[in-house]
Image: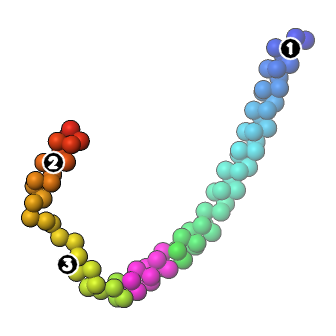
């Protein structure tokens, strides 16, 4: 047996082991999908409740905070010249 044959056999054995491990890992992930669905449902509910609370607590506080300046077209032209757009 030459060194190349030994090296090839090691690679094939390693590939066989990793494929079986990968198969087990994929099967475990597929088995946990229903449980992950429950967790995602709870996360959605929590984000939904906090979204409603945020809208109610800060309703109107940011009104008229963002506006478009009068010289907006000039700013856009300057930016396009500066960045070669």
Asked whether 49 falls inside the magenta stretch, the response is yes
| Cα distance between the residues tagged 3 and 2 | 26 Å
Near mark 3 (Cα within 10 A), the count class, few <14, some 14-19 or many ≥20, is: few
Name the chief secondary structure element in magenta: helix
Q: Position of residue 12 (x, y in %)?
A: 78, 27
Q: Where, by quadrant of the figure, is residue 37 drawn?
A: bottom right
Q: Which sits earlier in the primary sequence, circle 3 or circle 2?
A: 3
Q: Quadrant of the N terminus?
A: top right
Q: Nearer the viewer, mark 2 or mark 1?
A: 2
In the image, residue 72 lies in the stretch drawn in magenta? no
Q: Nearer the viewer, mark 1 or mark 3?
A: 3
Q: Which residue is mark 3?
A: 64
Colour mapping: rainbow
Determine whether, in the image, residue 22 is placed left or right of residue 80. Answer: right
SS state under label 3: loop
Q: Earlier in the sequence, mark 1 or mark 3?
A: 1
Marks 2 and 1, how far apart at CA: 67 Å
Nearer to the camera, 83 or 63: 83
């Amino acid at each position: 047996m030459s060194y190349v044959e030994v090296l090839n056999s090691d690679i094939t054995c390693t590939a066989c082991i990793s494929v079986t491990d990968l198969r087990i890992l994929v099967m475990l992930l597929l088995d946990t999908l229903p449980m992950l669905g429950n967790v995602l449902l709870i996360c959605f509910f929590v984000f939904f409740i906090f979204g409603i609370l945020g809208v109610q607590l800060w309703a109107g506080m940011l009104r008229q905070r963002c506006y478009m300046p009068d010289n907006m077209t000039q700013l856009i032209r300057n930016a396009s010249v500066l960045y070669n757009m």
